[in-house]
Image (spheres, helix red, strand yellow):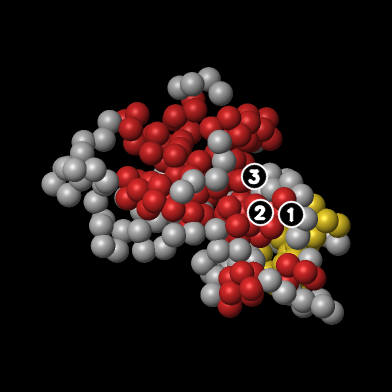
Amino acid sequence: MSERKKWKTQRALGLELPGLGKPGALEKRNFPPGQHGRSRKPKVSQFGAQLREKQKLVFHYGIREEQLRRFVRKAKSLQPSNWIEALIGLLERRLDNVVFRLGFARSMAAARQLVSHGHVLVDGRRETIGSMVLRPGSSIQLSERANQMEATRFSRQAPRLTLPSFLQFENSDIFERGKLLFIPDSSHIPFEFNSSQVAEYYAKRGV
C-alpha cells in the first residue's frame, strides 16, 4: 500500500490504524477524503458499519480478504460459541503482529519484512512466515544482524504502541527477547473496534 493510500484509508475509516505505521493521519484532515469530505455527513447503513469494522482488521493486520476468511473459519472450529474472540486471539498471535507489538518494527509491513527476510527467531529457530500463529510461552527475538539495523534500533527506542499485557520482555545474553504470555482477546486490539459488527458480517455470509 502506498503512503498516500495509507493516509486516505485512515481518513475514510475515521481513525488511525497503528499497523499502517502512519501516525497523525487525522490531525489536520479529520474528515473523509474527496471533494465533499469536509461538509459531508455520511449516513452509514448497517451493512456499511459491519464492512467498516471488518476493513479495520484487513488494513491494520495487512491481510487479504481471503486470509481473513480463513482465520474466521479456523476461529469457528476452535471456539464455535465465541469465535470472534478466538479470531482476535489468532490475529494478535501472528508472528508479524507480535514482532510489531514488541516494538521491533514501526508498522505491520516492516514487521512482515523482517520475518520474511529471516531476521526473526522463535524459540531460537529462524522463522520466515509472518502468518505463523504463536503459542503461549513462545520466545521471540531479532537476529543479531537485525538487532544492529538502524530501523529496528529506532523502532525500539520509540515504539509505535505500548507493550500489551500478553507480552513481556526477557533479557538474554545478547539482546532483548520477548515472550508470549497468554492468548489475547478483543480487549488487546490497539484501536476502536466493534467485534459484534464483524460477527454479524460473517454470519450473514455463511463463512
Residue 144 higher or lower than 137, as above or below = below
Earlier in the chain: of badge 3 and badge 2, it is 3
The answer to the question of whether label 3 and label 2 lie on touching residues, with beta carbons closer than 8 A, is no
- What residue is shown at x 39% (from left), y 51% (from top)? 4
* Residue type highlighted by circle 1: His
- What residue is shown at x 44% (from left), y 53% (from top)? 3
Q: Nearer the viewer, residue 96 or 6?
A: 6
Q: Which residue is mark 3?
A: 90
**Which quarter shows the C terminus?**
top right
* Residue type highlighted by circle 2: Gln
The answer to the question of whether label 2 and label 1 lie on touching residues, with beta carbons closer than 8 A, is yes
Image side of residue 13 versus residue 203, left or right: left
Residue 113, disc? 2
Q: What's the CA distance linking mark 3 and mark 1?
A: 22 Å
Looking at the rendered image, the disc whose residue lies closer to the viewer, 3 or 1, is: 1
* Residue type highlighted by circle 3: Leu
Q: What's the CA distance linking mark 3 and mark 2?
A: 20 Å
Q: Which residue is mark 1?
A: 117
The quadrant holding residue 35 is: top left
The answer to the question of whether label 3 and label 1 lie on touching residues, with beta carbons closer than 8 A, is no
Q: What's the CA distance linking mark 2 and mark 1?
A: 6 Å
Mark 2 element type: helix
Of all residues shown, which one is farthest toward the top?
206
